[in-house]
Image (cartoon, rainbow, N blue to C red):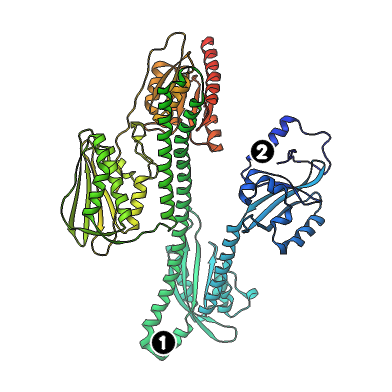
Amino acid sequence: MGDGTPGVPTDNSPPAEGPSPDDARRYRLLFEANPLPMWIYDLETLRFLDVNEVACRKYGYTRDEFFSLTIRDIRPAEDIPHVEESVRTMPANSFESGLWRHRLKDGTLIDVRITSHEMPYLSRRARFVCPIDVTQQVRAETALREREAGLSRAQSMARLAHVVTGPDGVFESWSPTLPELAGVAPGQLPRSTREWMRRVVHPQDRPLFRARSLEAAAREARVDVEYRIALPDGGVVHVSQVIEPIQDGRRGAPTRWFSTLLDVTERKQVEARMMRVNDELEHRVRERTAQLEVSNQDLARAKAAAERANRAKSDFLSNMSHELRTPLNAIIGFGQLLAASEGDLRSPQRQAAFVGHIVGAGEHLLSLINEILDLASIEAGKLAITLAPCPLHDVLAECESMMEPLAFQRRVRMAFPHGGRLHAVADPTRLKQVLLNLLSNAIKYNREQGTVAVECTQPGAGRIHVSVENTGAGMRPEQVDALFQPFNRLGREADGVEGTGLGLVLTKRLVELMGGKIGVRSTPGVGSVFWVDLADAGAHAATGGALARPPQVTADARPASPAMATVLCVEDNPASLRLVQEVLAMRSDVQLLSASNGRLGVELARTHLPAVILMDNNMPELSGREAHAILRNDPRTSKIPVIALSSNALPSAVETGLAAGFFRYLTKPFSADALLAALNEALEVSAGAAARR
């Protein structure tokens, strides 16, 4: 990055003295933490003097590579003369915002909007630059202009026009084809409904036009009217006009109107010559009007779909960050403990336990990544699906063989159908993936000595019905409704059964990709039946999903000696809780209580009044933020320092958490040193509060 620090001068003169070390660190932090690419280049040599990590990732160069380049190297050859001219002629105090093209390391050209200003840097004349990628915006604007031009040409060819009228009858906007339709120059076009009626509408048709306009205003509803336009040269144009209210959703807002005008002169002439084609021409007018309405509706639906997709993307990224950080927290934390040399942390038994946690978290992380990649392949349309007649007996026999060890380990009896010659049209590999997921969930979430029963039937209509029934805890209706949501394990995170929360989502997508259907019937306390409908002779196959049991809550609390400080850890992930336990085992002056959900955490806090509380956020029953709010509003617990342990590492989440009153906000994966340092500070605050009481 160079050995200087970017600053923001108020004029063109260098500062009287350099920034303080604190200022330098603060500016460096701002420069690196900015989510936008930024760099500084020498105005004489055009070489890069400084660049942040975001720019390196965006443009594909390392920092050292950037420092060997000039701004010419990231511009297309044909733009370089313009760049050099701009550098020579740009006033020193200018603040430029322009549109340029930049070339990435792989040769890709992107459109960027530049914001820059001149500044002294390392005793050189330099320019600070912030390039923002607007490639998609430029493409969208170009496409919009092309569509608007195409619409204008289409309206001209179809002799179609439109006009938007305000509540007072004044024309607000109109298509370029409206003056053509009225036979006047654009500057001579009437500017209100009243003037249109007086100057354009044929005298004999004015009463009809006025009546229909008043009717539309009275009813605030669509009105159609056909009348004649009297051209200045004495000719006549027959038009069909649709007057529609514009619904802007504001209660009590004055009504505005959208009118579509269509030249139907040809139709009227044909009517006069051949009455028998009258019905056909009217149908064409209605059809064209309906097409315009459908187009508007399609645009509205597309916009709503895009907004839903954007919200879904944000939710997915937030959840994925949490799910990735949780196993990483266990891997890094237990790895740090393995590297420690104090006390009995080096015993073979404890090291073996730590390694087991690391391997388990790694396998969970690998499963999560594989399922995310499969989902991404499906969404991108790149998952290969090969449909062929698939014998269910062979597939189920293979699944039974693969599931026997897990069933034996969980003491669950499996019952598979034998015989039969049912064939489904499916991708054999993906069908097996679907059935294995259903069977694995049916075993994992079953009760001990339970049963998993598989049945295959032909209910008719060319369909094959495959069901997987278990005798587990069953699900409530609201759990069934949330069954196929990404990362939603229905509160099963605390029961010790590993899972990613993506298996059912992936299963459902595979089913639908193969043209099948999936469903579930569940009774709390009895069990659940997941079913898949597969096409017989030419249709697609379908898949099923996972079960979930109600969340378990546990607490491990022992009476603390008077010399010990009580610390309550509220954490639903077993591996993360174990990590906290091992870290705090280094402290002989701390007694640890634990709770696996927010509601139990609140109860233990009120009962034991711990000195410090460690609080996870994503938990069943109550989230960490909800539990913290309850404790803050209770006089008995309002002064207890609460340290957040969260997988949400977004800066906005950290700021919101601290603003809500958390004593410290640690993001997973956190180091043992960071946890102990935060705990020491919290214990000091708690001890001081106790002394004052």
- Looking at this view, is 436 or 276 the one in front? 436
* Left or right: 434, with 255 as reference point: left
Position of 454 with respect to 90 (left or right) is left
Q: Residue at x 66, y 55 (%)?
A: 113
- 534 over 154 or under it: above or below: above
**Where on the picture, by quarter, is residue 465?**
bottom left
Q: Residues within 10 Å of mark 1 (few under 14, many from 20)?
A: some
Name the quadrant of the N terminus: top right
**Residue drawn at 42 percent across, 42 percent down:** 366
Residue 21 in percent (x, y) is at 74, 30
Instruction: Give the side of residue 60 with respect to residue 554, left or right.
Output: right
View extreme (top): residue:
562
Direction left: furthest residue: 419
**Amino acid identity at mark 2:** Leu
Label 2 belongs to which residue?
A: 30
- Where does the image place residue 571, in percent across and percent down from the top left? 42, 28
Which is more toward the observer, 222 or 49?
A: 49
Residue 499 screen position, x and y as percent: 36, 39
Residue found farthest to the bottom:
273
Circles 1 and 2: CB distance less than 8 Å?
no
Q: Which mark is residue 129?
A: none
Q: Disc 1 marks which residue?
A: 271
- Does residue 527 lie above or below 106 as drawn? above
Residue 368 figure quarter: top left
Q: Earlier in the sequence, mark 1 or mark 2?
A: 2
Q: How many marks?
A: 2
Taking the spot 42% from the left edge, 34% from the top edge, the residue there is 359
Residue drawn 82% across the image and 57% down it: 89
The answer to which of 649 and 2 lies nearer the viewer is 2
